[in-house]
Amino acid sequence: WCPSWPPTSPSTPAAFCTNLLAVLILRANRDQSRMRIMLYFLSVVECCQQAVSALYTVATLTVRAVICFSDTAGAGQEPPKLLDVFSDARIVAIFVRNFWVALIAITRWDAVAKPLRPRFNAYGRNAFLGILAVTLAVASLLILPPHFLADVCAISRYYTFYSCVSNV
């Protein structure tokens, strides 16, 4: 009855390091446009989110190890409610992470593909991007492989770094 929760994505440490590098690159440049400042804060928040995700995974795996390998686990008893709470919290955490990754990927795409973005005013564009991020997060939670959006975000991060490094 102990679920096999996967730890964080294998690309999480690499994503954390690349975001940290983005923070340092963007911080080093003094004359920054509004887009570069926004990307800086996105990278800072993403670093914090990945650190919290790693801590959450460590806590989850620790609780799982303590409960699943205790004496009551081998006796065929019903799983403790704590595991159910952690399982529900993990689903919520995956949704929040997918929403955030989708929002960052969409924002970075929006920065790169200015001519292609829809013609909205500021409020309409932000609402459109938010709805698109929620849709992607729900879709990824239900049907997509777990690291699909992380791969999309990694591709968009490559373009972000290319633009940052070439302008430093």
Image (spheres, rainbow, N blue to C red):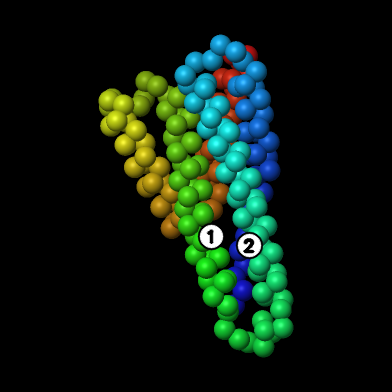
Residue visible at 43% across and 58% down in the picture: 142
Q: Residue at x 51, y 44 (%)?
A: 149
Query: In the image, residue 86 lies at what x, y percent?
Result: 55, 65
Residue at 49% across, 15% down: 33
Is residue 34 positioned above or below 146 on the image? above
The location of residue 130, given as percent across then percent down, is 37, 40
On the question of residue 157 being in view, the answer is: yes
Q: Are marks 1 and 2 in contact (CB under 8 Å)?
A: yes
For the N terminus, the image quarter is bottom right
Q: Amino acid at mark 1?
A: Arg
Give the secondary structure at mark 1: helix
The residue type indicated by label 2 comes to Thr
User: Up-down: is 18 above or below 119?
Assistant: below
| Residue 60: quarter of image | bottom right
- Estimate how packed mark 2 is, as few (under 14), some (14 to 19) or many (20 or more) residues with alpha carbons within 10 Å: some
At x 65% / y 18%, what residue is drawn?
28
Q: Which mark is residue 80?
A: none
Q: Is residue 92 left or right of residue 131?
A: right
Crowding at mark 1 (Cα within 10 Å: few <14, some 14-19, many 20+): some
Q: Is residue 32 above or below residue 104?
A: above
The kind of secondary structure element at disc 2 is helix
Mark carried by residue 60: 2
Provide residue 119's location: percent of width, then percent of height: 28, 25
On residue 90, the disc is 1
- The image position of residue 113, as x and y in percent, is 42, 24
Quadrant for the C terminus, please: top right
**Above or below, 17 relative to 139:** above
Does 15 sit left or right of 160 as displayed? right
Task: Inspect this view and state whether residue 155 appears.
Answer: no
